[in-house]
Amino acid sequence: MSSSTLSNLSFRNAIFQLHWLFGITAGVVLALVGFTGGMLSFEDELLKALNPGVMTVEPRGAALSPEALVERVRAQRPDDAIASLQLSADPRDSAYVGFAAKDGGRRGERVHVDPYDGRVLPEPRYKEFFSVTMKLHRWLVADEVGKQIVGASTVILIFFCVSGLYLRWPRRWGSLRTWLGLDWRQKGRNFLWHLHSIVGTWVLVAYLVMSLTGLWWSYDWYRSAVNDWAGRDEQAQPRENTDRGTPPPIDIAATWQAFNAVAPAWSNATLNWPDGAEPIGFRYLDADPAHERARNELQLDRWSLEVVDHQRYDDGSWRQKIGASMFALHRGSFFGTTGVVVFMLASLLMPLFAITGWMLYLDRGRKQRAAAALAGGVASLTAPQPRGPAGGAPVLVAYASQTGTAEGLAWQTAAALREGGCAVDVQPLGKLDPAMLAAAGQVLFIASSFGEGEAPDHARAFVRRMRDGAVAPTLAGLRYGVLALGDREYGDSYCGFGRTLDLWLHHAGAQPLFDRIDVDGADAGALRHWQHHIGQLAGRSDLPDWSVPRYRRWRLAERRLLNPGSAGAPAFHLALVPEAASDLDWSAGDIAEVGPRHASAEVAAWLRAAAIDGDAPVQLDGHDEPFAAVVARSRLPDPDSMRGQPPQTVAEALKPLPHREYSIASLPADGSLQLLVRQMRGPDGRFGSGSGWLTEHADPDSDIDLRIRCNPSFHPPVDDRPLLLIGNGTGLAGLRAVLKARIAAGHRRNWLVFGERSAAHDGFHGDELERWQRDGGLPRLDRVFSRDQVERRYVQHLLGERVDEVRRWIGEDGAIYVCGSLEGMAPAVDAVLGEILGGEMLEAMAADGRYRRDVY
């Protein structure tokens, strides 16, 4: 990672922090300003609709002439001097008369007048409501202080628009769907962030226009600057001519006739009474104006009624039009009725960003508090002997968290390891350097991705140490695992930082404990897979699941020993059928998670020791069942601690046994979910909880608790590219399903390299493999049996003997799938493939999805 990239990353994080800080401060003000602005969008139309008989009238023949109308108004308001008269070309509109201001006021009263009889009409209803709404919108009903707050918030809105665009600029910037596609399938925090960013993009242009024009009313200097730019002189006064003496009184009839003679057809016209010797002024809108503020201005000489000045909106330059259209731009009417509707909706959506921003902020705080609570819980556990899983240094759990999710998972991971008897050290990634990693021995990384695959804020210091060329291969003694958190919505940058971290560690010579696990959102299946590896690392098979198991019921329909007489542990072919046919739904490469149970004899012994009746009915999750059934699938505490307690109380306190994972060896079209399970025993000779249940304790036709986890990282290629499948032992299960899918799709360029102990006893599914070879679905089949010769020979040795064939096979855009044991086989195969193809090519294949592993 170059220094310029790091500099950009630091700048990006700084912008994010400012965006966040301003959002939780100015966001509330902007929500109020935006919502009130949306309410004002159709103020005139609403007031007209709510005030028939006041703002609109019923046409009744010919309207009064302007001079007659003025005389009738003067008769009703003899003490008030008329300052303006506004008429409409629409016969349904009332006239509008303005009176001169009194007592030094800025504006005088304005009243509606019936144009047919000259009656002064009542004050329109709801006008005060909209007046208060306008005051809230412009200055929070707080005079100059409120005006300054609104002005500052408007500037911040401009920052939001620019910074928001910068922060969410996608790498696939040419995709409209990436920019504008709202995915309603998102949940939780992901949905909030998605809503905040996508809807923000929808309204970004509208907000920029609103804010840049809104500043017109907030700051005098801004208004003056816009006027100067537009070539408008806001302070220009009408020209007076005092050389000809006292001006004559205004002849309204002649004046209006002179106006009509000069002006084109108009929709609305206002006559303003001049002061002193100023010209007579008219403001009018054309019959079909561009918008409600596309005003034309006409000045007539007081003595001759000749035109002194005539400025038409349509004749102005584009700058002058913009300068004269601040309100129309702000409201959206500059773009027609559609613009008003769009701007109104954008304004009404303003609270959405305050709400989602605050929810994201609070969620972040909640997760940080939860992480702190988990940290306290881990600290309160009885400290084990200072050893790691292999008796060495403590396991280091390093997290890179933007919102607290990764930190919370780090402490959950630490708690699981501590419960397994391992010493643990939890640190934020930003505090670490390569030397500290090398000294740690074993490190578990939990890495969130921020924005378009970048590191979270606090990991920036670590990223600086990861830049290109900064680290030599000095981590050869390090073993690590990576849990990468991300969101598939971000396409190529999905789990970007976790992937970058994994690649950097690989380049530095570190060896993975298991393949990187990518988490889409808060995918419970991927997190269970991580937990499964944590349990193996801690040497504990009974660590509780982090998520509540939601199994489906399946029936054990077949169990067949595959390797009688083998020197290895017994391996069984199992077939399970679901209670509901709709559960026959998975893809090749997916994983079966089985909920194990204790042997019936062990359950009976525990019930006797606890002195509790196993037949007593209990209720869990709304279902009634015997207490013994709950005990069978639960972690068993010391029976003396439960002795004599009510069965319902004990049932609610018991924790379920953790699930066990098995690669699915069949397709739904086979009519059953098939597994290949080797019987495992602990040092004390006890069966493993999963394999013991499936291969020994469960009777034929027994109910099996099972759920399917989608594993897209091992789904077969969708095209007919050459596929090299490599595995050993029960790893044949996942490869068998992939082969079945390939053959069913007519994709026949398949090569299987499989290893076991002896051909006489361990030829798992040998007849089926040989039939596929004869039929052309598996043209290349190489089986390696390690015990059938004096010197041990494994799959990696055969690959080393087939260098040219492997290169040719992969050179045709082929892919490699590996399934089997992580210890021994997987790293040995990885090493020999690196020698055959080159490390860089193998990494490129992994990045392209052409090198995939399902190892355990």
Image: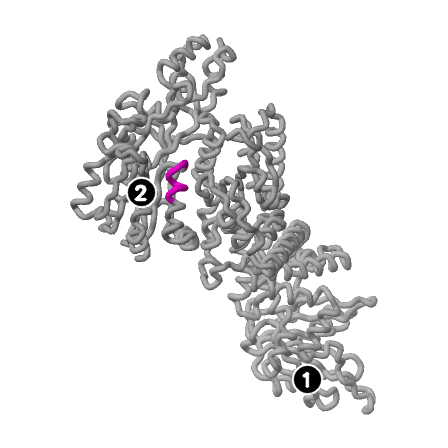
**Residue 269 x/y as whole percent:** 63, 77
Q: Nearer the viewer, residue 818 or 555?
A: 818
Residue placed furthest toward the left: 774
**Residue 799 x/y as whole percent:** 32, 46
Residue 77 vertical placement versus 463 (above, below): below
Residue 634 vertical placement versus 206 (above, below): above
Q: Nearer the viewer, residue 572 or 91?
A: 572
**Residue 71 x/y as whole percent:** 70, 75
> Left or right of 293: which side holds 236?
right
Residue flagged by tag 2: what amino acid is it? Answer: Ala
Instruction: Give neighbour class at mark 1: few <14, some 14-19, many 20+ (Cα, 10 Å).
Output: many
Instruction: Determine contact: label 2, label 1, CB under 8 Å.
Output: no
Q: Quadrant of residue 229?
A: bottom right
> Left or right of 77: which side holds 310?
left
Q: Nearer the viewer, residue 129 or 322?
A: 322
Q: Quadrant of residue 44?
A: bottom right
Residue drawn at (68%, 61%) of the image: 155
Residue drawn at (55%, 53%) of the image: 454
| Among numbered discs 2 and 1, the one appearing first in the sequence | 1
Magenta stretch in the rendered image: 823-829
Q: CA distance from mark 2 to mark 1?
A: 88 Å
Q: Quadrant of the N terminus?
A: bottom right
Residue 371 vertical placement versus 342 (above, below): above
Residue holding disc 1: 255
Residue holding disc 2: 588
Q: Secondary structure at mark 1?
A: helix
Q: Secondary structure at mark 2?
A: loop
The answer, for residue 77, to whether it is visible in the render is yes
Residue drawn at (82%, 67%) of the image: 104
827 inside magenta stretch: yes
Q: Quadrant of the C terminus?
A: top left
**Residue 790 x/y as whole percent:** 29, 33
